[in-house]
Amino acid sequence: MANILLNKPATASNSFAPFLPARAADGSITDPKSRWVCSQLPAWLCVDLQGSIWISQWTTYFMGSVGWAANYNLCDFKLQGSLDNTNWFDMDTVTGNTANLVNRNITPRLVRYLRVYITKGLAANNQVSSIVDFQASESSNAPFLANLVPTAGSLNPGFASRTFNYSIGVANTVSSIMFTLTAMQPNMTIKVNNTTVVSGQQTQAINLQPGSNTVTIEVTSADSTMKTTYTVLVTKAGDSNLQLNSVDVAYAGRNITPGTVNVPMDASKNSYDAKVPNGASTITVTPHAQDSTVKIQVNGNNVQNNGTSGSVTLATPGATVVSINLTSSEGSDTRNYTLNIIKG
């Protein structure tokens, strides 16, 4: 199987020239000068796989493999994996080693970073660690998608087998979405929102609500030992009919003539100012919605479309904030407006 660590970026807890981390990921297994050396414990040698890999086999070559005595081989160490280079988990453990190389098959794990973590170095000197080459292979039946095609919108980012999180934006008029999913290999199981689908065929329609809709895709290997999860966040635009065309603000108070201020509105703004005379002490609000079926509340109280709210007392001094909330007739979407009533 291919060595997926070959010439990938390598780092270490400690090293000294010329025995740098990259020399343990260059594929050389015969040159004793091509190795990594560290003089502190605990120690680690890490390789960035630059993508998500299902590791099922790993190999480490020690100094005994290039002609040195066996007491220059590492003693106690672990294989560890991580998806973020911060949180690590153990994948395999070796203690009391005397072999010139370790070559082990393991239960596959999905990782982005792979490292050898050393707690006891060379038998000849426990504080010193040295690895001639570090290699690993991916499981031959790793469960990935070969393709993912939606019936609406476009995947962001574009599809790649080892990219697991996507987003799609669709218009408000799109009521559902389907996907055509193709497994990387035969006999893999694909589930979409926990429903099994056939590779290469279109899924059933997935109904969309305004706002965020999460679609979860699980691909399981033929032997059921591995499962890769893809997530698609489908965002459906809000109800275009949740719009106020205008609002009438009627004011009254001592020593002023009652009047009305008309506040025109547009689709792009949710906050507006309405100026009333200094002497105004109360107002009422009459909203005019584009869609007569929407539900309207003014400061939390129900108001009919083109109907007038109850009296609102104005702050003295300062502005008074009036909230106008629109809810679609089926209750699935909302839009919140703010009126800032300013005296002056």
Image (cartoon, rainbow, N blue to C red):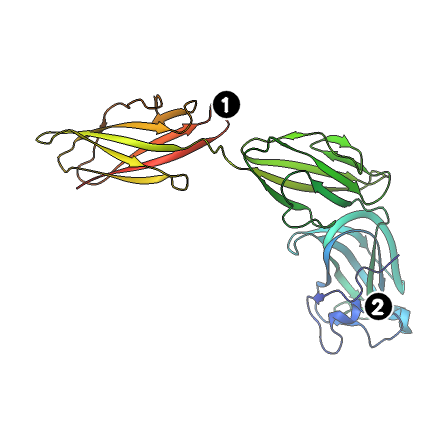
From the viewer's side, name the closer residue of 261 and 64. 261
Which residue lies at the image location 44% right of the left edge and 31% below the top edge? 242
Query: In terms of secondary structure, where does tag 2 sit?
Result: loop
The answer to which image quadrant residue 243 occupies is top left
Measured from the top left, where is residue 94 in percent x and y?
82, 55
Which residue lies at the image location 45% right of the left edge and 31% below the top edge? 241
The answer to which image quadrant residue 339 occupies is top left
Give, as a three-letter code, the residue at label 2. Gly
Q: Residue extending furthest left?
A: 255
Q: Which of the two marks, 2 or 1, is nearer to us in this view? A: 1
Residue 299 appears in the figure: no
Give, as a three-letter code, the residue at label 1. Glu
Q: Which mark is residue 27?
A: 2
The answer to which image quadrant residue 307 occupies is top left
Residue 238 appears in the figure: yes
Few, some or many C-alpha atoms within 10 Å of disc 1 (few <14, some 14-19, many ≥20)?
few
Q: Quadrant of the N terminus?
A: bottom right
Measured from the top left, where is residue 64 in percent x and y?
89, 69
Q: Which residue is mark 1?
A: 330
Measured from the top left, where is residue 195 in percent x and y?
73, 29
From the viewer's side, name the closer residue of 326 and 21. 326
